[in-house]
Image (tube, rainbow, N blue to C red):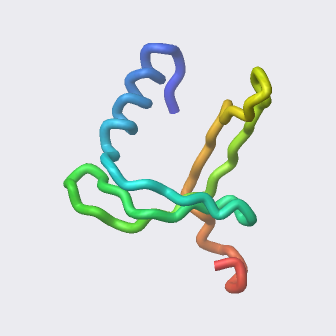
Amino acid sequence: MARGHRRLTATFGWVGSRFQGGGLIPEDAVGIERGEVTVDDGSTRPMTIRVTHADRRLDGIWRLVHRQCASPPTDRPQEAR
């Protein structure tokens, strides 16, 4: 947890610096993105994240205004995996 502009800026900078290249592909129906990413040590690995996007129409164009992501829960029903 971090509070204040300076600490949040440092935290977001640190998180962003850990990832390079790759991309995640949204699966709209269930709010899951899957892809391959490069983290910290330079090795590429698969990543699955649960996402929530909030969009807003600005000047006639839909824009992403908020994105929140987390690791998917491990206790999901088998059919949802």
State the image quarter where residue 35 is shown.
bottom left
- Position of 76 with respect to 23 (left or right) is right
- Residue at the outermost front position: 60
- Position of 58 with respect to 41 (left or right) is right
Q: Position of residue 23 (x, y in %)?
A: 43, 54
- Total labels: the figure holds 0
Please report the residue visible at 52 percent of the width from the left and 15 percent of the height from the top: 4
Please report the residue visible at 43 percent of the width from the left and 21 percent of the height from the top: 9
Which of these two is toward me, 7 or 18? Answer: 18
The vertical placement of 48 against 57, above or below, is below
The vertical placement of 12 against 27, above or below, is above
- Position of 63 with respect to 18 (left or right) is right
- Position of 45 with respect to 48 (left or right) is left
The vertical placement of 60 against 39, above or below, is above
Please report the residue visible at 68 percent of the width from the left and 74 percent of the height from the top: 76
Q: Position of residue 27 (x, y in %)?
A: 65, 64
Q: Position of residue 67 (x, y in %)?
A: 62, 40
The vertical placement of 30 against 78, above or below, is above
Please report the residue visible at 23 percent of the width from the left and 61 percent of the height from the top: 43
Which of these two is toward me, 15 or 19? Answer: 19
Tell me the quarter of the image containing the C terminus. bottom right
Q: Position of residue 15 (x, y in %)?
A: 39, 38
Which of these two is toward me, 78 or 21? Answer: 21
- Residue at the outermost left position: 41
